[in-house]
Image (tube, rainbow, N blue to C red):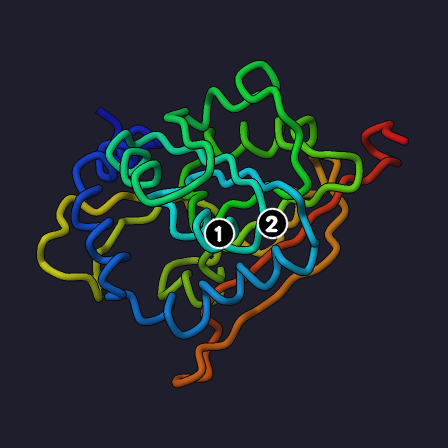
Amino acid sequence: MTRYSDKKIIDSWLQNAEPWISAVQNDEIESRLLITNKAILNTILKRNPANVLDIGCGEGWLARALTNENIEVYGIDIVPELIAAAKKDGHGKFVVLPYEDVSPSTITEKFDVAVCNFSLLGKDSVANIFKNIPDLLHEHGAFIVQTLHPISGCGNAPYTDGWREGSWKGFNNRFSNPPPWYFRTLETWKDLFLSNGFAIDDIIEPLHPKTKTVASVIFVGTINPLTTGRN
């Protein structure tokens, strides 16, 4: 079996769903509390959406924050235990759905915003998300992605696209079997948007308030009528 693959990511999250729910609910992830949660929420709210598609919604913290702002949320995730937690504590619509199955045939609604918050870890699955998102957005909709910044995430490895070893560094010892992840350079992330019919409206680089290092990168893409043929 291949050492790194999208399936390995899923296997890991199926195994670590319970400790992840606990870590989020008990505020154990400092960077989320200090900057990245607020950064993604503020970026979405600036679009004034009526509804949001939360892809890789996890246990539903972002969905809850958005419903508190009177925004309708449709959350999807591959992990049944995470979806069960989201349904228990949230007011949106939540379904178990693999990224590979995301398409207009499985999601018949259209949205003002689609968001992936640290939820694009794979290779082929991510390509499918980008290919199908334009058909799931309203005419002036936005696709917002927050992910590990390529500069800080590269570490000592070559700055080239490719699979990387996973790690639960900074998490408690209840986590095991860390998921691998597919590293993309800044240019590759930009190309994913541009080659799938998006214009990039903004690239935001939130700074960690304590270390003053870049905590993440947020891309805001909008439908480009010149490349999609939309009016």
Pinpoint residue 77: horizontal percent, then vertical percent.
38, 33
Lateral position of residue 186 relative to residue 22, left or right:
right
Mark 2 neighbour density, 10 Å: few (under 14) some (14–19) many (20 or more): many
Q: Of tags 2 and 1, which is closer to the observer? A: 2
Q: Residue at x 81, y 30 (%)?
A: 228
Pinpoint residue 206: horizontal percent, then vertical percent.
53, 71
The kind of residue on which mark 1 rests is: Thr
> How many marks do you count on the picture?
2
Image quadrant occupied by the C terminus: top right
Q: Is residue 167 above or below residue 231?
A: below
The residue at which mark 1 appears reads as 160
Q: CA distance from mark 2 to mark 1?
A: 23 Å
Q: Nearer the viewer, residue 210 or 110?
A: 110
Q: Are marks 2 and 1 in contact (CB under 8 Å)?
A: no
Lateral position of residue 5 relative to residue 47, left or right:
left
The residue at which mark 2 appears reads as 144
* Residue 105, picture quadrant: top right
Q: Is residue 126 above or below residue 50?
A: above
Q: Secondary structure at mark 1?
A: loop
